[in-house]
Amino acid sequence: IQISNIDLQDYIDQRKNFTTDEWIDFLIHTVGLNPEAMNRREKFITLARLLPHVENNFNFMELGPKGTGKSHVFQELSPYGVLVSGGDVTSARLFVKIQGNKELLGLVGYWDVVAWDEFEQQKGRNVDAVLIDTMQNYLANKSFNRGKGTHEASASMSFVGNTKHTVPYMLENSHLFESIPTSFIKGAFLDRMHLYNPGWEIKMLKKNSFSKGDGLITDYIAAVLHALRNDDRTALLNDYAKFDGSLSERDHLAIRKTFSGMMKLIYPDGKITDEEAKEIIDFAAEGRKRVKDQLYIIDSTFCAEPARFEYVWLKTGETIKVETLENIEHKPINKDTEDNDKEENLKLKHSGSRPRIKPLVAKTISIRENQGGVTYKDLFGDYLRTAKDIQITDPFIRQPYQIDNLVDFIQMVKDVSTIQDTVKIHLSTQNDDDEKVAEMIDSFNDLADELLPMGIEFTYDFKADHDRFIKTDTGWTIALGRGLDIYEKFSRFSLSRCSQKNRRCKAFNVSINKTEE
């Protein structure tokens, strides 16, 4: 269906008929994917692929495994964008072709988005140095010099390609840009990227990944995105946050442009809560920090003036630090404490004293959505080692997968416990469905029978209220924001079934406090 014209204000006005979650899901359906197969962070990463369509001169890069739909929106969604093979782009084709006395404008003069597909190292292909120099100038200044004149354009640049190694490997041995053509791995080019989208967090597309619901006609949404390019919302960020002065002007611009684009996509009517604004700001800052972190590795000159990615939330005066999920994920939850303990114990060993046992302290742990490598043992295993009596209150231990979580928890207690005698574990849960309660009783009785010979006395009741926590006879209370149900769904045939470290998390907090001596 060809759309001859659109009423942009009508599109904006319709936003009020949707909740934020409904609108995000509607957009995900529109790009052809199934929102039920994604968590909120995965939806944000998917929608970020639309930023070059809705923002002028937006410089976007996404690298990740094959089959995650990186180039889909650039190939199928909009007639205002063009997808080109990264190995076939020339300076003349992209910018200006000089033909006799004529200067013929290239792709950037005719399209909203020029997307480079398969933007990765390919043997036997060298990139023209003139292309890179012209590209760097264009990405920074929206203009380029070719022939006799200076030309300006508003086309956004998108670079999508496949990674060669896993993220842990790249973080440990190289950098997150390692798979792109070597000619482009230099600070002057990469510093111009406004957003590095973490394509490795998106699952490979399968049969259930595609939409079966209602979305907008692609020609219509393409026309809407094209029209929204004229609406600049970068200044709105100043109403919410003030970023640290150590950030460069390119850092600030990148964050503002991503914020503006996500605002136009998710909140086109401008109606946004403080918490929703913070969510977009954090996402925008993280996408730019991912670029900057790798620049420190690639180009040592950037290390002379390191940027602190933190901002003051103007509504409260609170200072908020921003970190990329992969950096959090590949740093153990208790790493700082463990490092301090190792250093202290080493000193004691050299002095002839007995190494001290790590003291347990009250603390709060925050886990990000989609974070991996998180286990029950890492979160609170140390606080259960000497407990003889553990009480779990969680009204949502009722579905089979939730009972599996309980079994995982009990296995962890068995692994960490130093108690030689019987350990008592009592579960207080809840269910209003009598038929389901009967099934739960059978499951819990089977579990109790199996645990008793192993030195664990398991009991249960159905008296839980809405609170979720763990209490020990040693005086610790562990408040669980989501109870034991902290993991995203995973398939039956998955390594996630075997190890919690392979699972992705929902967002949650754990607060651990001493309740009695």
Image: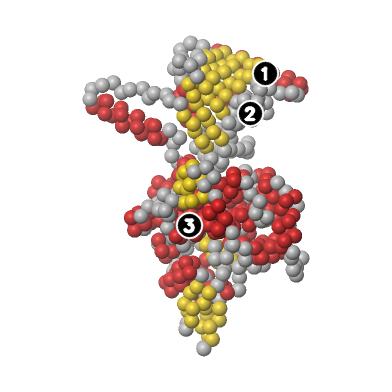
**Residue tagged 3:** 252
x%, y% of residue 510? 53, 30
Q: Nearer the viewer, residue 144 or 423?
A: 144
Q: Residue at x 58, y 48 (%)?
A: 277
Report the Cα–Cα distance between label 3 and label 1: 52 Å
**Residue tagged 1:** 463
Q: Quadrant of the C terminus?
A: top left
Say whether residue 32 is visible.
Answer: no
Q: Nearer the viewer, mark 1 or mark 2?
A: 1
Q: Are marks 3 and 1 in contact (CB under 8 Å)?
A: no
Report the Cα–Cα distance between label 1 and label 2: 17 Å
x%, y% of residue 399? 68, 28
Q: Is residue 314 above or below residue 484?
A: below
Q: Are marks 3 and 2 in contact (CB under 8 Å)?
A: no
Q: Residue at x 52, y 80 (%)?
A: 97
Q: Name, please, the residue furthest toward the top.
A: 421
**Residue tagged 2:** 402
Which of the 4 image quarters holds residue 496?
Answer: top right
Counting residues from the N terminus, which is met first, the one under dot 1 or under dot 2?
2
Q: Is residue 402 left or right of residue 249?
A: right
Mark 1 residue crowding within 10 angstroms, few (<14) / some (14–19) / many (20+): few
* Mark count: 3
Report the Cα–Cα distance between label 3 and label 2: 43 Å
Counting residues from the N terminus, which is met first, the one under dot 3 or under dot 2?
3
Q: Nearer the viewer, residue 26 or 170?
A: 26
Q: Nearer the viewer, mark 3 or mark 2?
A: 3
